[in-house]
Image: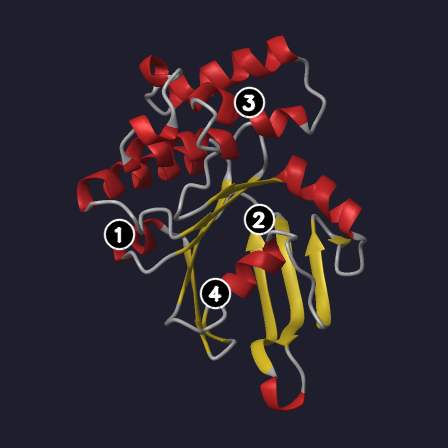
């Protein structure tokens, strides 16, 4: 039986006022079930990034409701949203967003600090995760000493640090060559097989082929789901 994880009900997000008003999302209603692999697609300016920010508790809507595990999170304070982000959601970005002065191990350990996880536990888990993404021998390397694909693997390991239920990835293959991009897709597919809910904003048709659900946006509205 499918179990609802995320539900958006008539969600709208407007930036600016009057003449400068931008309707980034307009009356979006969609449901994502636990364990699904979902691709968010659409042209530039379609509302993909806004959709991701709202699903990822990085922003709140002007109108509508968002439910996470049947809890309405639309009206929560930022401190409460931050707690949800830290425990429930792992983020993977196109630009990797690694801390340049931290080595691979330290980058993966970082999210666990904010959850007050003891250092020994942080270190062991980070080692296990780097091994899982095939970087056991690169743990002491700085991001500048690694390829783009290796940096994205570290970013995925970091996203898994607090064992979140949801992985949100924004164009995770956008800065990679096709071969490396396919390797990242394989990792995402494996995580989905292990029960993680994967939500990917992408232009990559190879990722879209892996998705169990494709949500297409245009001008802030869903045109296919």
Q: Which residue is mark 2?
A: 2
Q: Residues within 10 Å of mark 1 (few under 14, many from 20)?
A: some
**Residue 162 makes an appearance in the image:** no
Query: CA–CA distance between discs 4 and 1?
Result: 18 Å
Query: CA–CA distance between discs 1 and 3?
Result: 30 Å
Q: Which residue is mark 3?
A: 109
Query: CA–CA distance between discs 1 and 2?
Result: 25 Å
Query: CA–CA distance between discs 3 and 2?
Result: 33 Å
Q: Is residue 220 left or right of residue 118?
A: left
Query: CA–CA distance between discs 2 and 4?
Result: 25 Å
Query: CA–CA distance between discs 3 and 4?
Result: 29 Å
Q: Earlier in the sequence, mark 2 or mark 4?
A: 2
Q: Earlier in the sequence, mark 1 or mark 2?
A: 2
Q: Which residue is mark 1?
A: 206
Q: Position of residue 51 (x, y in %)?
A: 55, 63
Q: Earlier in the sequence, mark 4 or mark 1?
A: 4
Outermost residue on the front side: it is: 101
């Amino acid at each position: 039986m499918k179990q609802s994880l995320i539900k958006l009900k008539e969600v709208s997000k407007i930036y600016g006022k009057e003449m400068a008003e931008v309707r980034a999302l307009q009356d979006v209603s969609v449901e994502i079930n636990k364990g699904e692999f979902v691709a968010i697609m659409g042209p530039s300016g379609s509302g993909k990034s806004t959709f991701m920010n709202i699903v990822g508790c990085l922003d709140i809507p002007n109108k509508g409701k968002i439910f996470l595990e049947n809890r309405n999170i639309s009206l929560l304070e930022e401190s409460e949203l931050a707690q949800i982000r830290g425990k429930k959601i792992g983020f993977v970005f196109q630009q990797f967003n690694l801390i340049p002065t931290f080595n691979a191990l330290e980058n993966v350990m970082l999210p666990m600090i904010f959850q007050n996880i003891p250092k020994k536990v942080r270190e062991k888990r980070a080692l296990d995760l780097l091994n899982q993404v095939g970087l056991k021998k690169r743990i002491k390397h700085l991001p500048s000493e690694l390829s783009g694909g290796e940096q994205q693997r570290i970013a995925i390991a970091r996203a898994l640090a607090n064992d979140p239920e949801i992985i949100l990835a924004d164009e995770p293959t956008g800065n990679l060559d096709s071969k490396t991009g396919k390797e990242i897709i394989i990792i995402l597919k494996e995580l989905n097989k292990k029960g993680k809910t994967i939500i990917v904003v992408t232009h990559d048709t190879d990722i879209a082929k892996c998705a169990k659900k494709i949500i297409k946006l245009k001008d802030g509205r869903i045109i296919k789901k």
